[in-house]
Amino acid sequence: MHSKEFVEKMKERLVEEKDRLQDELGQFGHHEEIGDRADDNALEIEMDEVSEDIAETLRADLAKVEKALQKIEDGTYGMTDDGKEIPESRLEVIPWADTLAEK
């Protein structure tokens, strides 16, 4: 089991990451019209598609961070779904990790 101090440190990092992801997602809700020519409209559509892909990645990352924060509240942070302990060295790199590193 991970120490209370370690879990608190990871919680701080997770909250910071959650805030960052939410800020980034908020920026995707605003886009400007590029122009009214066909070329401009095609570029705008392409940019919207790329933005949606990025936003989807950010939403997935946010869900992982929120799951890790919930696991802290539940007292199961740092454990895989099948009950194995995730090494602190892995959590230091990926605080929202919920699996063991593959060898």
Image (cartoon, rainbow, N blue to C red):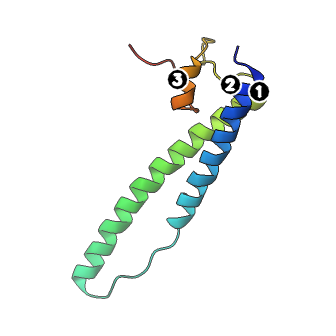
Kindly identify which residue carries mark 1: 74
- Please state which of residues 35 and 89 is positioned toward the viewer in this rendering: 89
The reply to whether callout 3 and callout 2 are in contact (CB within 8 Å) is: no
Residue at point 50%, 50% (across, down): 58
Characterize the local packing of mark 3: few (<14), some (14-19) or many (20 or more) Cα atoms within 10 angstroms. Answer: some
Q: Amino acid at mark 3?
A: Arg
**Residue 77 — which label?**
2
Residue 98 visible to the viewer: no
Residue at point 53%, 68% (across, down): 29
Q: Amino acid at mark 2?
A: Tyr
Q: Considering only order in the chain, which callout, 3 or 1, is on the residue closer to the N terminus?
A: 1
Q: Position of residue 99 (x, y in %)?
A: 52, 21
Q: Position of residue 85 (x, y in %)?
A: 61, 13
- Please state which of residues 37 and 27 is positioned toward the viewer in this rendering: 27
41 left or right of 87 in image = left
The reply to whether callout 1 and callout 2 are in contact (CB within 8 Å) is: yes
Kindly identify which residue carries mark 3: 90
Q: Considering only order in the chain, which callout, 2 or 3, is on the residue closer to the N terminus?
A: 2
Residue at point 57%, 63% (across, down): 26
Which quadrant, please, contains the C terminus?
Answer: top left
Q: Amino acid at mark 1?
A: Asp
Characterize the local packing of mark 1: few (<14), some (14-19) or many (20 or more) Cα atoms within 10 angstroms. Answer: few
Characterize the local packing of mark 2: few (<14), some (14-19) or many (20 or more) Cα atoms within 10 angstroms. Answer: many
40 left or right of 93 in image = left
Residue at point 60%, 55% (across, down): 22
Which quadrant, please, contains the N terminus?
Answer: top right
The picture quadrant where one finds residue 80 is: top right
18 left or right of 103 in image = right
